[in-house]
Amino acid sequence: MKKDPLIAAVGIFLLATAGARADAKVTVENNGNDDATSAFKFTTVPRPSADDAATSAKFTIVAGSADSNGGSLDNLHDDKLPQEADQPAENFFFEAGSHGGRVQVDLGHGINIRQINTYSWHPATRGPQVYKLYAAEGTATNFNAAPKEGTAPEQCGWQLVADVNTKPKLEEGGGQYGVSIANPAGNLGQFRYLLFDMMPTEQDDEFGNTFYSEIDVIDASAPVAGDAVSAAKLFTFKTADEKCTVTLNTTQAPGLENWATNQLAPVLAAWYPKITALLPSPEYTAPTHFKITIKPMDGVAYTAGQDVVANSTWLERELKGEAIGSLVHELVHVVQQHHSRSNPGWLVEGSADYIRWFLYDADQHGADMVWMRKHGKNFSPHYNDSYRITANFLNWVSGKYDKDIVAQMGAAMREGKYDENLWQQYTGKTVSELGDEWKKDVMAQLASKDSPAKPN
């Protein structure tokens, strides 16, 4: 079959995405019928991944009906590809004669997305792809996870990421298509939900709904496809429960490679499952992959979604001190997944330091009365001073009023439902009353010269 000249000339082109995110660029490649193979190999668009974030995601039809002659939604993320151009059962497509439909993808938790790739294959008009891609964190008050046909996603908590139309201007456009949606300057953003609003390629007859073969969602923390040199330098390991893969990147801090591999990694592997058990919430699954990059930078460390970045210079100074504990703190942030801007920062950081100093590193006395006594007579802590001080407060509340207070507050913040009234609900006292009582206890211990410097 003769190719459309616009595609035959270069094979690759960018689509305009008017009205979509300005940072999203759509790259399209077409292998004509004579060139398409079961390998789905393209020049610029990555080949389908065998282990991407969509593999374990939940796919749901929220509008329209699947064609009974095609395969199920599992075909879109089972990492199995059709072997020939016209294999209905190995693809997913909407019912013949319909106007398409909508497929929702639930990744289970918010992830920082680097790239979204879609693949299709058909010898005629059902090869090209026509769809709008929306994304959402799922935390908006008006969020509708399953907008039906006629409901504008933009009006119920979704944002348009890209408007894809790979139909060539000439001929019917058969063959194999690879579409890659990415932000050349960084990542697409952090999202839990994706919505594909799929439309037919033509309506001259009833057979215009695309044969979709696979949908990949690439986590920003995953190694860059084709970067064999970088991938070879990364150290990847499983957590103790085998549920999460961790990637350590020390390419910019080669002096810490041995420490990270042999000392840091075993602690992270053991403590990640413990932290996920300490911070549960209904229907929540902690990230199943995250990355830690160690490199020279300002500060100590920070976490953004599933990406942890740590200062190699600071770590080198603290190898016999706080180096590993600081990354246990960041491990808590990976599990927390607190995305609501209304969450109090003092509680987010205090919870992470509570787990670090009172559960992981308790024998180091980094936030208890031993530590507080080092601050002298003028020390006057407040419960929301964050980090170690809030950690001490949370430990006190846990011991005196509610042993599950950190988990309960963590679940509320994860769901965007934190409210100060929760303190009264769980302990019978307001947070201010608890703070006053805690401080009185702390100051009494600090003032007592005869009492031993025991942890509280």
Image (spheres, helix red, strand yellow):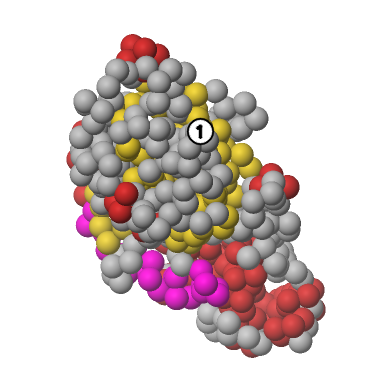
Q: Quadrant of the N terminus?
A: top left
The residue pinned by badge 1 equals 204
**Could you say which is closer to the camera, residue 131 or residue 54?**
131
Taking the spot 50% from the left edge, 30% from the top edge, the residue there is 165
Horizontal relation, residue 424 to residue 453: left or right: right
Q: Secondary structure at mark 1?
A: loop
- Point out the residue furthest to the front here: 205
In the rendered image of this protein, does residue 320 appear above or below residue 404? Answer: above
Q: Amino acid at mark 1?
A: Asp
Q: Is residue 196 visible?
A: no
**Could you say which is closer to the camera, residue 40 or residue 371?**
40
Taking the spot 29% from the left edge, 51% from the top edge, the residue there is 90
Horizontal and vertical percent position of residue 370: 53, 73
Q: Which region shows up in magenta?
A: 261-284
Q: Is residue 239 visible?
A: yes
In the rendered image of this protein, does residue 201 appear above or below residue 413? Answer: above
Q: Quadrant of the C terminus?
A: bottom right
